[in-house]
Amino acid sequence: MSLKQRLPLLRWSFIRMGIGAWHFAKTGQWGDGREAAAADYVVANARQGDLDDVLATIDKFAYEKSFLINVGDEKGALLDAAVRRAETQLALELGTYCGYGAMRIARAAPAARVFSVEFSRANAEIARRIWAHAGVADRVTCVVGTIGDGGKTLDALTQSGFAPAGLDLVFLDHDKNAYLPDLHSILDRGWLHAGSIVVADNVKLPGAPKYLAYMREHQGTVWNTTEHKTHAEYQTLLPDLVLESEYLGG
Ligand SMILES: C[S@@+](CC[C@H](N)C(=O)[O-])C[C@H]1O[C@@H](n2cnc3c(N)ncnc32)[C@H](O)[C@@H]1O
């Protein structure tokens, strides 16, 4: 890995995210077209129908062209392991972005159906384009909305087959302040079962302190959590924390 790849502060596309923060909060994109450019790059460079190649091509884009906020290769390996440990048949991701995380879940669980909730319609379209190129569009679905939208998205998921004790894996990777309320909404629907696993990204950076405190408070009673010390995506300077929490039921 080159010095530029290890140190994000040497990359304009990383610094540019500071300028685009307001735009990102409103639209889910950084405002310089990098998300659409990533989809164009995948279609132009990755072998059609080759999920491994599509994921590797997105990683290459994020390292060499423009920084992306996918879960990335290092934390992605933790996600892959959790997906396998949960013996995932049905997965729910919150925060689709360009569709990378959902594809990692689909690759680690080749028979699973994967649903991903994203508030930005533009991001949903980009992810769907990439999923079609990767050949997973038949089992990876984006639902445009939020878990906190008054029941609309939760009801859409129910209509898609979400049922009590039917959800094996949840990947929280959206609004950090929504991790805890959205997890409670999922619990209220009864979708989790003993042994379901919830993976939460970015618990240290940018941080989800209330979620971390909740998991620590309920350690050994409702949840069994492993705290994975790792790095924020696509560099090795900034530390991050991924939580992998097994639901104990009750
Ligand atoms: C870090 S990115 C997700 C990356 C993706 N999980 C991956 O690994 O490829 C966060 C995404 O969450 C979306 N988002 C933010 N708040 C949301 C919410 N409340 N519900 C759904 N999506 C949300 C943003 O638009 C953005 O696309």
Image (cartoon, grey):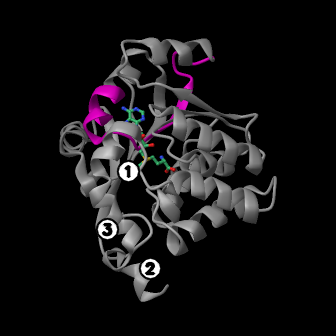
Labels 1 and 2 touching (C-beta < 8 A):
no
> SS for tag 1?
loop
Residue 229 is at least partly visible in this image: no
Q: Position of residue 243 (x, y in %)?
A: 35, 50
Reading the image, the residue beneath label 2 is: 5
| Amino acid type at image mark 1 | Asp
Q: Residue 201's mark?
A: 1
> SS for tag 3?
helix
Q: Residue at x 48, y 26 (%)?
A: 193
Q: Is residue 201 left or right of residue 70?
A: left
For marks 1 and 2, the one nearer the N-term is: 2
| Amino acid type at image mark 2 | Gln
Q: Which residue is at the front of the view, 202 or 2?
A: 2
Q: CA distance from mark 2 to mark 3?
A: 13 Å
Is 12 located above or below residue 130 in the figure? below
Which stretch did the figure color magenta?
161-183
On whether ligand 1 comes within 8 Å of the CB at mark 1, the answer is yes
Q: Which residue is at the front of the view, 176 or 64?
A: 64
> SS for tag 2?
helix
Q: CA distance from mark 1 to mark 3?
A: 21 Å
For marks 2 and 3, the one nearer the N-term is: 2
Q: Is residue 178 magenta?
A: yes
Q: Is residue 93 magenta?
A: no
Q: Residue 15's mark?
A: 3
**Quarter of the figure with residue 7:** bottom left
Query: Which residue extends farthest right?
Result: 48
